[in-house]
């Protein structure tokens, strides 16, 4: 078994959609980024790459490549899952935390889990999504950014390198 951790942060921005876990959330600000800026999915991708010693999201889906401009991060997660499977691993569980003051995320967490589970071809029961605030401290607490953390446990299923 191997464990990987991931982290991401994006600035909030006017005139951008807010997408977290593949869910478009109604809110007056979105996240600034080259792709759809889905911090939750980006943290998950990094945790998976970390667990299988495959670098990070920027190495696989660089923001210098125009083909990833406005990319759907759930699709990038599906591509990450292919790499995970090619390396002979499967996900045992995935634990995540999103940090933002607003909006409240409880109404969207179930759909996020469903989207992530579909992209990873796993049961949504293997996924935990927690939402926390920063009590108005630092950029996330002031509403100027949203952060996400992810930890994944994977298990070797084949002898693929």
Image (tube, rainbow, N blue to C red):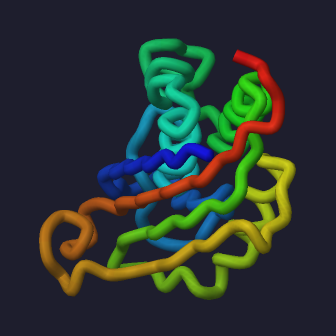
Say above or below: 71 vs 3: above
Pick whichever, 24 or 88, lies toward us.
88
Q: Residue at x 49, y 30 (%)?
A: 57
Q: Residue at x 54, y 15 (%)?
A: 66
Pick whichever, 74 or 27, lies toward us.
74
Question: Splitting the image into 4 quarters, where does residue 77 fall?
Answer: top right
> In this image, 74 relative to 48: left or right?
right
Image location of residue 15, percent across then percent down: 45, 53
Which quarter shows the C terminus?
Answer: top right
Pick whichever, 140 or 94, lies toward us.
94
Identify the residue at the far left of this view: 138
Image location of residue 125, percent across then percent down: 78, 73
Image location of residue 33, percent across then percent down: 42, 39
Question: Splitting the image into 4 quarters, where does residue 12 fall?
Answer: bottom left
> In this image, 13 relative to 74: left or right?
left
Q: Is residue 92 visible?
A: yes
Q: Residue at x 50, y 57 (%)?
A: 151
Image location of residue 3, percent across then percent down: 52, 48
Q: Residue at x 24, y 79 (%)?
A: 134
Say above or below: 46 vs 160: below
Q: Is residue 75 visible?
A: no
């Amino acid at each position: 078994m191997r464990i990987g951790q991931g982290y991401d942060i994006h600035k909030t921005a006017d005139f951008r959609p807010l997408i977290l876990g593949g869910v478009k959330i109604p809110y007056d600000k979105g996240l600034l980024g080259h792709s759809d800026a889905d911090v939750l999915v980006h943290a998950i991708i990094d945790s998976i790459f970390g667990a299988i010693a495959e670098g990070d999201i920027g190495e696989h889906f660089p923001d210098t490549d125009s083909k990833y401009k406005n990319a759907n991060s759930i699709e990038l997660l599906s591509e990450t899952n292919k790499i995970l499977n090619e390396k002979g691993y499967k996900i045992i569980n995935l634990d995540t935390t999103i940090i933002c003051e607003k909006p409240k995320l409880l109404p969207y967490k179930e759909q996020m889990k469903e989207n992530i589970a579909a992209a990873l071809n796993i049961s949504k029961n293997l996924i935990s999504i927690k939402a926390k605030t920063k009590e108005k401290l630092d950029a996330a607490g002031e509403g100027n950014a949203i952060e996400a953390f992810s930890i994944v446990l994977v298990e070797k299923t084949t002898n693929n390198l």
